[in-house]
Image (cartoon, helix red, strand yellow):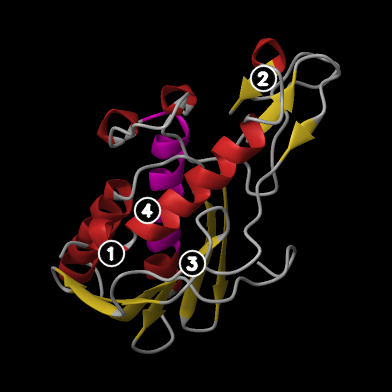
Amino acid sequence: MTLAEALEPLYRSYLRRLDEMAARLPAEALLTEKTTRDEEGRLALGEGGLPLRFDVADARDGHTYEVHGARADAPLAGEMQVGRVQVRLEPGNWEELPLVCVFDGEPLREDAEELADLVRGFATLSWYGGFAAARPGRGAPGADRWAGRLHGVRVGLHENELWAVLDLGTLPPSALQTLCEALSGYCEDRVPLAYVRIGGKAPEPGAI
């Protein structure tokens, strides 16, 4: 089993919630995964610095809707090895999924900054659709309306842990497989990580 396959239930549950939310609006009023602009015409930015991308919006009045799971979804495995990285999987929600990279000890500043740049770079690439072509086919009505893009990220360092909270949007699970392969390369060429955790409880907004 690959990491992407293990995370499939989280992804599928999120898409199901999106489909249910989209079905509440008339087709002619439905906007999906759209950005928004301020009064000066600039893209409005989210907390992590990427432009805001909303799950669903109503074209009639501009009202936006965000999906939030009532409970965490369980992955198909609890632990996997991706190259040099031990990945621990816990239940979580695709729209607010923690990614925690744990160093063996307190990292050098440049090592921590390089890791943060790697995660932010992944998020930026994903926001612009870098993995959209990898999204799996679905038989659900209107499934092709979803763009396969990440919606947002928050990144911060806490002692020997780099925390990222990812709003993965409709990004396919194979993208996280690619990220962990890049983290394996970081371990090989930069500094080893004790492990990486995906899922679990997300910190409160503003905590990172």
Kindly indicate the quadrant of the structure image that contains residue 106: bottom left
Q: Tell me residue 30's x, y (percent).
A: 67, 19
Q: Tell me residue 182's x, y (percent).
A: 24, 56
- Alpha carbon separation for disc pair 4 and 3: 26 Å
**Neighbour tally class for label 2: few under 14, some 14-19, many 20 plus, Cα within 10 Å:** some
Task: Find disc 1 in the rendering and name its residue.
Answer: 6
Part of the protein shown in magenta: 113-129
**Neighbour tally class for label 4: few under 14, some 14-19, many 20 plus, Cα within 10 Å:** some
Mark 1–mark 4 CB contact (< 8 Å): no
Amino acid type of the residue that numbered disc 1 sits on in the rendered structure: Ala
Amino acid type of the residue that numbered disc 4 sits on in the rendered structure: Leu
- Along the polypeptide, which appears first: circle 4 or circle 2? 2
- Relative depth, front residue between 182 and 16: 16
Residue 72 part of the magenta segment = no
Task: Find disc 4 in the rendering and name its residue.
Answer: 118
Q: Secondary structure at mark 4?
A: helix
Where 73 sits versus 122, above or below?
Answer: below
Task: Find disc 2 in the rendering and name its residue.
Answer: 30
- Alpha carbon separation for disc pair 2 and 1: 31 Å
Residue at the far bottom in the pictured view: 105
- Alpha carbon separation for disc pair 4 and 2: 34 Å
Q: Tell me residue 151's x, y (percent).
A: 55, 40
Mark 2–mark 1 CB contact (< 8 Å): no
- Along the polypeptide, which appears first: circle 4 or circle 3? 3
